[in-house]
Amino acid sequence: MRRIFQEDSTAVRGQKFLSMVEERQAAGNAIRTDEWKTVLEELQIGRASFYAMRNKLLGAGLISIKNKEYRLSGQFSKDLIDMARWWWTAVLDQSEESL
C-alpha cells in the first residue's frame, strides 16, 4: 500500500477500504457505489480524498467496479506475474521455463 499512497494514513485507509470490500463481497452484500456517504463516515475521510484513494486502487488493479458494486480484482496479481516474468527473462537473462 505504501507504494501506491504517499502518506501512511492514506495507506491505512486504503487497506481498510480493501478489507471492507473483501468482507462485504464474501458475505454476498458488496459495497455499492451509492453507499459512498457511509464509507466516508467509516473511513473518516472527505469525499475528494475518498475518490482519489479509490481511483488509485482502481488504477492499481486492486479493485474494480461491476454493476455499481466494488469488487476485489485479480488484475494486480496478473500484473505482478507479468512483471516477474519480464524481470526473470529480460533483466536476469533466465529462461522462462526455469521460472
Image (cartoon, rainbow, N blue to C red):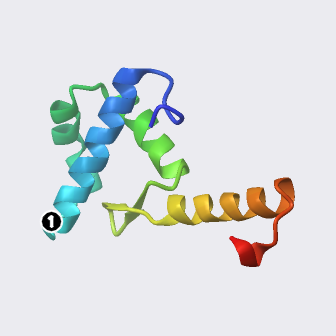
Q: Is residue 11 visible?
A: yes
Looking at the picture, which amino acid does disc 1 mark? Asn
Q: Position of residue 74 (x, y in %)?
A: 46, 66
Under circle 1, the secondary element is loop
Name the residue furthest bottom. Answer: 97
Quarter of the C terminus within the rendering: bottom right
Viewed as shown, does residue 78 lie left or right of 22? right
Quarter of the N terminus within the rendering: top left
Name the residue furthest front. Answer: 98
- Quarter residue 48 falls in: top left
Viewed as shown, does residue 43 lie left or right of 10? left
Which residue: 81% across, 64% down?
Answer: 89
Label 1: how many Cα within 10 Å (few below 14, some 14–19, many 20+): few
**Residue nearest the observer in this picture, 9 or 50:** 9
- Quarter residue 29 falls in: bottom left
Which residue: 39% across, 61% down?
Answer: 65
Q: Is residue 31 visible?
A: no
Which residue: 29% across, 53% down?
Answer: 33
Q: Position of residue 11 (x, y in %)?
A: 39, 31
Q: Position of residue 50 (x, y in %)?
A: 35, 34
**Residue nearest the observer in this picture, 33 or 91:** 91
User: From the viewer's perspective, is residue 2 above or below residue 98?
Assistant: above
Which residue: 43% across, 63% down?
Answer: 73
Q: How many marks?
A: 1
Q: Give the labeled residue for mark 1.
A: 29
**Residue nearest the observer in this picture, 66 or 62:** 62
Q: Position of residue 78 (x, y in %)?
A: 57, 66
